[in-house]
Image: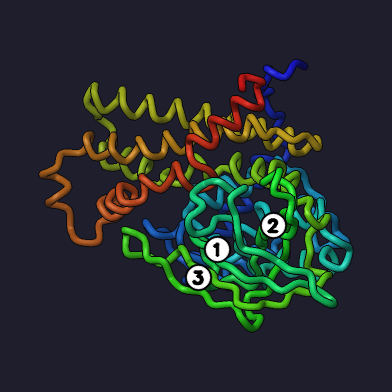
């Protein structure tokens, strides 16, 4: 295969797919009947420890990890099916999402044995959560520009600096944080290391960053002489840059990159009803066909990960297309439902509420997980075009 190739081979879904979907849907019905959660416009930004613990008990966190580390040794495609159902049904995932999607696989691939035996079972049970500490003030989307530094001391490292846009650090137990440890001025990519930090340690301050929707999901995390023991380094010291490609393949290809606004589409279809106009039918048909294409591209990447491949270029393509799709969807939905009808809907109407929130959140979607410009540069490099 040449450097300018990429591919999305159709994924062969597991034979138990239909049964697995039924099990997840029954579980979600049970959680709603018990009052653990109810579908809402805000579920993607919500977490429920009770829900995550129940999900872990069913074996649906850490599904692909080895059993000796708390996992269940199922396939990436089975995990994909479960994730689709959870997202499509508005489950509150934030208490375990990052730990399951990328921090667990990061530790599994690069972490030491103590981390795998001690931390991964806590993630898989839903007991512990983990945020991601990459971006920094004044560095934009350029991870190579990070300045937060870890300095070697006896028995560990002293950390000073700050991370920003750190999603859900305020209710996470750990932070997988990228820090500068080397002094090589000739290469900004060299000399960075990954650490697992316990957010209860002294010297860590978490300040809320309120988004334009009035919600608290982002945070500013400040480190003031925080001591991190040696056993919390993930992988090689000064060698974290090579970890990022595999980690971001997990993040950028996940179903959340094209199902974030799925509830808006479903509510739109319900609102339009069984007799849509030609314009409504054409627009909804277009959105559904794009959704199906993204689903199959994303499932293809899950199949590649299942085979031990590193589909970094393909994942960047899915993320770029998926976030563009999700930015476009609420604007189309707004034009398809008469403004007067929307104004007449009662306060708290789920369609109006979901559409309003989706329109507010849309500008951020092409920033999270890598800006469009960063993604397209990565795609071009991966294809040998630059």
Q: How many marks?
A: 3
> Mark 3: which secondary structure?
loop
Disc 3 target residue: 36
Cα distance, mark 1 to mark 2?
Answer: 17 Å
Which structural element holds mark 2?
helix
Image quadrant assignment for residue 15: top right
Q: Residues within 10 Å of mark 3 (few under 14, many from 20)?
A: some
The label number, if any, that marks residue 163 in the structure image: 1
Using the rendered view, name the quadrant where residue 384 is placed. top right
- Quadrant for the C terminus in the image: top right
- In the rendered image, is residue 61 in sight? no
Q: In which quadrant of the rendered image does the N terminus lie?
A: top right
115 vs 373, left or right, is: right
Q: Earlier in the sequence, mark 2 or mark 3?
A: 3
Residue 108: x %, y % from top left: 80, 55
> Which of these two is toward me, 114 or 60?
114
Look at 42% across and 59% down and name the residue there: 39
Q: Secondary structure at mark 1?
A: strand
Q: Residue at x 66, y 44 (%)?
A: 250
Provide residue 258's location: percent of width, then percent of height: 49, 39
Residue at label 2?
103
Percent position of residue 164, x then y: 50, 62
N-term mark: 1 or 2: 2
Q: Are marks 1 and 2 in contact (CB under 8 Å)?
A: no
| Badge 2: residue crowd in 10 Å (few <14, some 14–19, many ≥20) | many
Badge 2 vs badge 3, beta-carbon distance below 8 Å: no
Whole-angstrom CA distance, mark 2 to mark 3, is: 26 Å
Q: Residue at (64%, 83%) from the top-left corner?
A: 202
Circles 3 and 1, Cβ within 8 Å, touching? The answer is no
What numbered label is drawn on residue 4?
Answer: none
């Amino acid at each position: 295969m040449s450097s300018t190739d990429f591919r999305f081979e159709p994924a062969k879904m597991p034979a138990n797919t239909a049964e697995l979907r039924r099990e997840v849907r029954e579980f979600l019905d049970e959680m709603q009947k018990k009052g653990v959660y109810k579908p809402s416009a805000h579920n993607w930004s919500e977490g429920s420890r009770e829900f995550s613990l129940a999900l872990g008990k069913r074996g649906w966190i850490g599904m692909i990890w080895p059993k000796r580390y708390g996992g269940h040794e199922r396939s990436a495609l089975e995990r994909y099916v479960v994730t689709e159902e959870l997202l499509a049904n508005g489950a509150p995932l934030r208490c375990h999402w990052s730990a399951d999607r990328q921090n667990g696989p990061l530790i599994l691939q690069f972490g030491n044995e103590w981390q795998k035996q001690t931390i991964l079972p806590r993630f898989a049970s839903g007991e512990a959560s983990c945020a991601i500490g990459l971006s920094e003030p004044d560095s934009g989307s350029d991870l190579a520009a990070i300045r937060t530094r870890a300095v070697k001391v006896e028995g560990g490292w002293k950390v000073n600096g700050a991370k920003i846009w750190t999603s859900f650090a305020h209710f996470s137990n750990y932070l997988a944080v990228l820090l500068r440890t080397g002094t090589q001025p000739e290469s900004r990519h060299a000399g960075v290391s990954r650490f697992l930090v316990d957010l209860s340690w002294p010297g860590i301050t978490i300040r809320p960053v309120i988004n334009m929707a009035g919600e608290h999901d982002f945070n500013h995390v400040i480190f003031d002489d925080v001591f991190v023991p040696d056993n919390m380094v993930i992988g090689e010291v000064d060698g974290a840059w090579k970890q990022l490609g595999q980690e971001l393949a997990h993040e950028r290809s996940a179903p959340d990159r094209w199902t974030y606004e799925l509830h808006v589409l479903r509510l739109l279809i319900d609102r339009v009803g069984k007799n849509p106009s030609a314009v409504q039918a054409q627009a909804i048909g277009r959105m559904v066909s794009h959704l199906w294409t993204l689903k199959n591209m994303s499932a293809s990447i899950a199949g590649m990960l299942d085979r031990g491949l590193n589909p970094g270029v393909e994942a960047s393509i899915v993320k770029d297309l998926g976030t563009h799709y999700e930015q476009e969807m609420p604007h189309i939905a707004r034009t398809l439902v008469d403004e007067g009808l929307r104004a007449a809907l009662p306060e708290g109407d789920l369609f109006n509420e979901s559409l309003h929130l989706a329109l507010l959140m849309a500008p951020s979607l092409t920033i999270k997980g890598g800006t469009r410009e960063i993604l397209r540069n990565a795609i071009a490099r991966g294809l040998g075009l630059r």
